[in-house]
Amino acid sequence: MYNSIKENITKLKNITSSSADFTVRNLVLSNNTDCAVITIEGMSDKETLAISVINPILETDFKDKKGRELFDYIHNSVLSNSEIIIINTFSEVIKFSMSGFAVFGVDGYDKMLAIGVQGFKFRSVSEPESELVQRGSREGFNEAMRINMTLVRRRMKNPSLVFETFTVGTESKTEIALCYIKGTATDSSVEEVRKRIKDCDIKIVLGAGYLVPYLEDSGKNEIFTGVGITERPDSLCGKLMEGRIGIIVDGTPSVLVIPHLFVENFHSIDDYSNRPYFAAITRILKFTAYLTSIFLPGLYIALVTYHPDYFPEVLIKNIQDSISHTPLPLMLEVLLIDFLYETMREAGLRLPKVLGHAVSIVGALVIGDCAIQGGIIGAPTLLAVAISVICSYVVPDLYPQITVLRLSFVVVGGIMGVWGIVMLSCIVLVYMSSKSTLGVIFISPITPFSKFNMRDVFIRLGWKKLSKHTMNVQNLKGGSVYEE
């Protein structure tokens, strides 16, 4: 920057194209030295700015202090803010001012002060909508990164909990925070995540999902992902204790967790609040619903088309009567029903809540009933698809993957029968077994199998046993097992 405050302000106005929200408060000190306070309208707290910055500066007698001496005196003896950073480039002025800081500069010195007076509006802390619990905290992350960091720190009063801030997005300049527990997360994993963040060359980051392809080992858009996402501070704290690394993105209420295991999609906070036997029943129910949602429509098509002798005689007669009165082949009939359902689901999600109920009523009562009565689709086929769709809601985190796999098994089952379903299942299992994130196999600890780690997969042991030996996901690398 220049020594002249006027030249600096002129340069900054050129950089921002004299944007309407770029504000400059010109001041004259007691020794007739020009200075200025630069802010972005709406990002700073005006009351805090006036009380802690402008008033002390105007009320202080600076006598004959000039240049650097004046700058240091204001920095060390006048301003009382807890967060004051010395900056010396125009890019830093833009970065801090657009983050809610007030930037102060004096004539005759080529550095400025970024003063923490943030006061932008944000949504209050409320219960997350996607991870509801019966027992436990009702607090969820919001869009303000610093507030999210505070929510985590409140639950983890541990000096080993570390937050590191980075800026991603060459155009958006989005601030993110890397959080981990030093000594629990391995240094190599933390360094690898740092490297991937620094190598991220994306222009704009408006949500946590923008960073997922850059954090995965392959860097490709695969069906399953090794990067998890959560809206709950207590859930994130539990992951950090297991050696995971969290990534808080400013402007989004979702926090990324890496590495993420497949079995964690079937776990919830309620599992650890309820009794172990009930948690085991719930998890087995979720696994069963997941398999049902993927395989049921495809198996139904394969068995009815190629192996009708597997059905009881009374049931196969009803199915055949239903199919004989419909104009479409069975596979196309299932695809049509699935298409109609996905269309109604999207309509229900995008419409206002008041109209969302009307969509479900029209879809279920009018379209469904009329389609069956008119002979367009069969009741058994509709029932199979409906059961599959309902089961997919049991594991909402895997809904996109379930949808893709369900359609794949429908097509393969309709063309190749049961053998096609078996072959595709083997391909999916091999793919999941070979996928890893930060060296951790995606379906650990099922494979490589670890008896010790299986105590919190399909069933959950009591807290007296779990608390004695805390799982560290980093130890799953290479298939190593725990020693009790």
Image: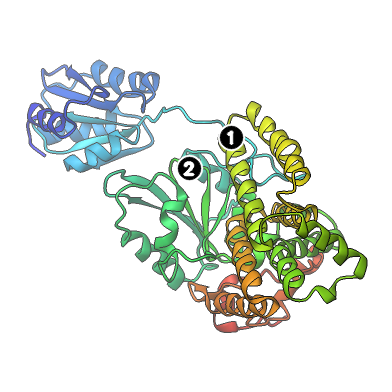
Residue at the (51%, 39%) spot, across then down = 147
Residue at the (69%, 32%) spot, across then down = 357
**Number of numbered markers:** 2
Q: Residues within 10 Å of mark 2 (few under 14, many from 20)?
A: some
Is residue 214 at all visible to an observer of this figure?
yes
Which quarter of the rendering shows the N terminus?
Answer: top left
Give the number of the disc on residue 259. Answer: none
Which quarter of the rendering shows the C terminus?
Answer: bottom right
Observer-nearest of 145 and 421: 421
Secondary structure, mark 2, is loop
Please name the residue that numbered disc 1 is placed on.
125
Q: Compared with residue 326, is residue 436 higher up or lower down, i.e. above or below?
A: below
Is residue 468 at all visible to an observer of this figure?
no
Image location (x, y in percent) of residue 108: 8, 31
Image location (x, y in percent) of residue 466: 75, 67
Observer-nearest of 83 and 424: 424
Image location (x, y in percent) of residue 240: 57, 60
Q: Compared with residue 164, is residue 69 higher up or lower down, i.e. above or below?
A: above
Q: Amino acid at mark 1?
A: Val
- Marks 1 and 2, how far apart at CA: 13 Å
Decide if residue 26 is on the left or right side of residue 139. left
Please name the residue that numbered disc 2 is placed on.
252
Work out whether mark 1 precedes mark 2 in sequence or the reverse, and give the earlier one.
1
Q: Compared with residue 23, is residue 103 higher up or lower down, i.e. above or below?
A: below
Observer-nearest of 202 and 40: 202
Decide if residue 430 is on the left or right side of residue 53. right
- Disc 1 or disc 2, which is closer to the eye? 2
User: In the rendered image, which quarter is residue 110 located in?
Assistant: top left
Q: Amino acid at mark 2?
A: Thr
Decide if residue 405 is on the left or right side of residue 171. right
